[in-house]
Amino acid sequence: MFDLFVGADPVPAAAPECQTQPCIEAAKSIKEFADFNADPCDDFYQYACGNWLKSNPTIPDDKTRTGTLTTIDDENKDTMRAIYEGTYDDLIQSITWQDVPKDFHVSEQKQIDEQNFQKVQDYYNVCMDVAAIDAQGPTPAYPLIAKVMAAFENGNAVDVEALTAAIIELDSNQAASSLFDTYIDADDKQPDIYAIKLSQPSLTLPKAYYAQPDGLEIYRQSMVDLLDKALGGGAVGTSSGSSSVGGIAALKSQKAQEANLKLLSKAEISATVDRFIQFEKQLASISLDPDRLQDPRQLYNPMPLADLQAKYPLIDWKNYFESLTAPGSSAPDYAIVQTPSYFANLTSLLQKSSSATTASTDGANQQQQQQNANMDQAIKDYFMVKTLLKWLYALDSDSRDAWQPVYTKLLGGTTAIPPRYRTCVSYTDGSLGMLQGRYFVMRKFGGDQERDRLENIIATVHETLLNLLAGSEWLDKQTLEAAIQKANAIKYKVAYSTLSPDERVPQALQDYYSTATVSKDSFMATELSITAWQVNMMRSKIDKPLDKNEWHMTADTVNAYYNPSVNEIAVLAGIAQSPVYSPDVPDYLLYGSLGFLIGHELTHAFDRSGRLYDPDGKLNDWWSAATAQHFEERSQCFIEQYNGFSFQGPNNKTVHLNGKLSLGENMADNGGVVAAYTAFEQLWTGGPLASGQPQPKHERLPGINLSPEALFFVSFARDWCSMRRPESSFVLATTDPHALERFRVIGPLQNNPKFSEAFQCPSGSYMNPQKKCTLW
């Protein structure tokens, strides 16, 4: 029995202890996490997570962070490893459902299911065959680099035709980011159709890093090392099980000659890297900061093809659009330009090249001509390196190890590489995710019966959100009616896909992946086939109605999401695992963890960006001016609150959160806690929402003398118990819309009066400040 810090009202002594196995395990878990000697009103994160932090003083060498959710992710990957390293019959025998639902077609489609299993298992195995991958050295990337570089073969100048050809090969055919990013997604104002969206590129490093000399030196040295190993003309080192030094060098020379690709001297590598980084720094300088990419109204800039060509004549846009379109379909005549300032500045930057646009250079002096030539070469270097980086994950260990310091020293702070099986499970998920999702669900989820239970919990929290909206006094009548209409229209995707494709039906999955082939002998050949399948799937969307049944994450993923264009939430089977989801624990634990997760996603429908979409998913500012002003004022409170949170980043430098960048997620966190707590409270006290629901057993957790209300908040916080390296924390705080885990607990609870009541926190204490930020 732990001593408790004075604060929380205990559960009535007359209430019996829950002695079921789920309750015993839940109590044990909470004791392993919580530090009951800490003051919950001074630092609730320490209170809820302190014992776990003490028991986990170090982060594993191969991880940037560790915690509750990363543990679930590891366990999910370990499950898939066991499945892939066993047989199909092993999988079937391991299913623990009392009755396997007929909807999963395990019996009547067994042969097809076995074929699907063999396909996904073969993918995992060819990924695991590091010896075969290493035996090829970096050479599988040579033909791919050569295809991109062939665009520049007609001369030294980088003109519109050459740049268009290079972008089509890298972007459209190899599915990589080059000078800009291209998405095919719902048109925000016509959400029943797909549109091409153009945005600034995904840079190799976060934008802030290009202004850090120390970080750039690590970046530069890693890139020199990589190019030396992958494209250098001299001998390279070897990894265990790979060919000899001389064998790899000879293989490189042979494959480079076959691909018509020139290998580089050390001097050429150094110069190439300098030009590449300088060019990337220029791209970073004209890219918008992440916090300026949060408002969908500013990102929605539809532009007819003719206007696009006139404003940004850096490539042949008609030709590019046609490359994104499946044969027999009509290429779109417009695109949505999400970052117009970037494209304008990119056009100006490339006009410094001798012929990147139609501008003539007649009469240019020698200095100008040299600058033009340098820019041309920098563009070629950029495309070469970007192609190599795209395929690096599928290359040999020597090449991958050369790049590792970018993650270990710069971005993540790790000192070791993750176990290969976890990497290959992740790759399998990215390539054949619907198949992996099926077998994960069969092994680790309860099928349709469990899915129905999960959906019932979602519906309960959803009903709570409707009540919270109805009670929001700052919404005027017009806006309130529209808000309730939108909330009523929110749809659910639960656990796994039952349409497009139906993961329960082996035939549907076989049809879905029919053109994606797996080579047992070559990981790169497999990846090329998968990439071609993915590209063709994307191309097939153009000129077609929006597929509203499509899932944007796979079933085994530890996550959930809200999709504003469809006005739906998805809660995946991968995150519906203990301790987030343990269906037989008391409601105060269930709603504190899973209930919060659901409330978080539902609240996204009314966050800074989600609120701008109507019930049908159309970008449509349906708020009255006065109510929108109230919303902005309340938003500013959250921005200021989270701006005040800080942590120790790399080199012990104090780093503050960016409250504007994380505003949407912070709103969802705060709203999620309120919605989940209200749902729990209704069920626990027999309120209106409890009608028709199973009556809760008012039982204590064994050995823990805390009230149900207090345990709700402990359960909520436990999901965010984690440790994160300073390097990873800095990347998250400067690029990610989510706050650090500690502040995902502290922030919402500082704003929540119910929390302060449960733990009797004095007004003005750290966890009960007088100024509180609220929406719902």
Image (cartoon, rainbow, N blue to C red):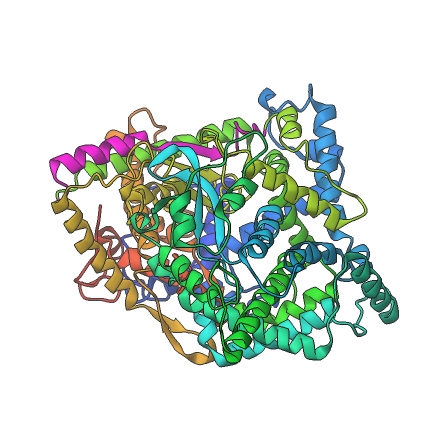
Q: Quadrant of residue 188?
A: top left
Where 612 sits versus 215, above or below?
above
Left or right of 396 in this view: 67: left
| Image quadrant assignment for residue 304 | top left
Q: Is residue 36 above or below residue 126?
A: below
In this view, the residue in front, 598 or 317, is 317
Along the line of sight, the residue nearer the viewer: 45 or 111: 111
Q: Quadrant of the N terminus?
A: bottom left
Q: Which image quarter holds the C terminus? A: top left
Left or right for 381, reference 342:
right
Report if residue 480 lies within the magenta region. yes
Q: Residue at x 76, y 47 (%)?
A: 125
Q: Position of residue 572 (x, y in %)?
A: 49, 40
Question: Image quarter for residue 272?
Answer: bottom right
Residue sitting nearer the eye, 645 or 252? 252
Q: Which residue lies at the image location 68% right of the left edge and 64% below the top edge?
A: 400
User: What is the span of residues highlighted in magenta in the rendered image?
Assistant: 474-503
